[in-house]
Amino acid sequence: MKQNAAWPLVAAREIQVRLRDKNFLMSTGLTIFLLLAVLLAQSFIGGGSMSYKLGVEGAEGTAIVQQAEQSAKASDEGASLSATELGDAAAVEAAARSGEVDYGLIKTAEGWELVDEGPTNAQLSALVGDVVRTQALTANAEAAGTDVGSLMEGTALTTRDLTETEDGGNGFMAFILGMVFAALFYMSSLMFGMQIATSVVEEKQSRLVEILAAAVPIRSLLFGKVVGNTVLALGQLVLIVAAGLIGLTFTDFDIALPGLVEGIAWYIPFFVLGFLALACIWAAAGSLASRNEDLQSTTMPLTMVLVLVFVVGINLQGTWREIGSFVPVLSTILMPMRILEGKTEWWEPVVALLLVIAFCYLTIRVGARLYQRSVMHTSGTLTWRKALMAKES
């Protein structure tokens, strides 16, 4: 069989075996179900009577909140809006950040401003906006406003997310989605990586690899195994992300969806290349072992690398975070986060992706070399060093 015709058959076999695995199907389905359940539950919890505590600067803000509550009770007796006078705008913002109040209502030159950490509830914004407009029009008319412009002066109600970045990026959603991206890459790399390693050692233990090697070039066997599991990992990722985006449409965060498209679009190639960069090394780790019991020792270095990437990726800040977003594998987590936050120039993700491609080529070469030199070795566990020095199968 020609080498270029062999690897697609191996990849198809990997995919078919996995899709017939009930545990894999159930775990994927359960993940999607739990994700949708959490998002829908948030929607239902938020769908009850309105109840918010607003921080205001003084009596004028309190009066607006009281009138807004009266309007809310007209359509829902269970609605509740309360005002807490905090003295000045800085204190109101601080209270909104700390969670002491749900929202802050601040007087501005243009009118009034609702502030909070996250998307503003549309119903609350409409209620307060109506009161602000009514009060401003009344005050302007009493002051002998002579035209519509004068009557409308000061009626604007704007909203501001306190986590929003200076260039308009949604900081709250960027943080949440960035954490989700990091967790998905960590779990997918660990789960499918261990699957690759387990598959390799089981083929060695059962001597099936000797039969396969007689019909399929060893390099094609490795390539097909890696490609098949990469396709499965990407498919699972797409299903989970799609389910999450659908679930978001039922929450107050749906207004942030348009701004997430670019970050998600960049995350996919970073995910695929980051996964590929590790997949051949996972296969090599499996080939170093002769029994399933030996996998823990041969895969431990890779597991530690993934833990380090995950922990460092979600904790780096400032300049180190920018530098880390160009480091292969770590960039899979950090660069999409920075894109979501609107903190990158157009060339930065391109350069980071090129670096991942170069690193991916290197790890595939090293992984293939280790795999070819150790996959036919069945008498005990090999170390990484011995495998590199061994003769090619």
Image (spheres, rainbow, N blue to C red):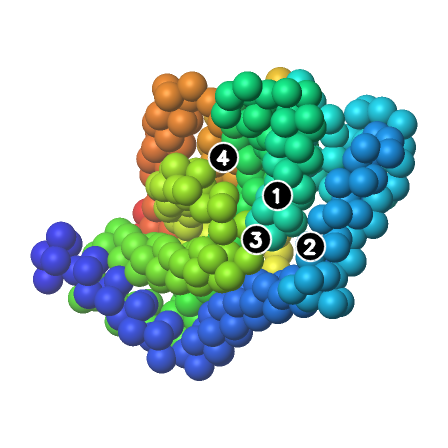
Label 2: how many residues lie within 10 Å, few (<14), some (14-19) or many (20+)?
A: some
Q: Which mark is residue 340?
A: 4
The answer for how far apart the CA atoms under marks 1 and 4 are is 33 Å
| Amino acid type, label 2 | Ser
Specify the quadrant of the image occupied by residue 152. Answer: top right
Q: Which residue in the structure is indicated by mark 2?
A: 71
Of badges 1 and 4, the one in the foreground is 1
Of badges 3 and 2, the one in the foreground is 2
Q: Is residue 89 above or below residue 267?
A: above
Q: Which residue in the structure is indicated by mark 3?
A: 252
Between discs 4 and 3, the one toward the N terminus: 3
| 339 and 81: which is toward the camera | 81
What percent of the width, then of the height, locates residue 278?
Answer: 45, 45
Between discs 1 and 3, the one toward the N terminus: 1
SS of the residue under disc 4: helix
| 60 and 345: which is toward the camera | 60
- Residue at horizontal 37 percent and vertical 21 percent from the top: 346
SS of the residue under disc 3: helix
Q: Quadrant of the N terminus?
A: bottom left
What percent of the width, then of the height, locates residue 36?
Answer: 53, 67
Specify the quadrant of the image occupied by residue 262. Answer: top left
| Amino acid type, label 4 | Leu
Q: Which mark is residue 130?
A: 1
* Side of 75 relative to 263 (left or right): right
What percent of the width, then of the height, locates residue 24?
Answer: 46, 73
| Amino acid type, label 1 | Asp
Label 4: how many residues lie within 10 Å, few (<14), some (14-19) or many (20+)?
A: many
Of badges 4 and 3, the one in the foreground is 3
| 234 and 69: which is toward the camera | 69
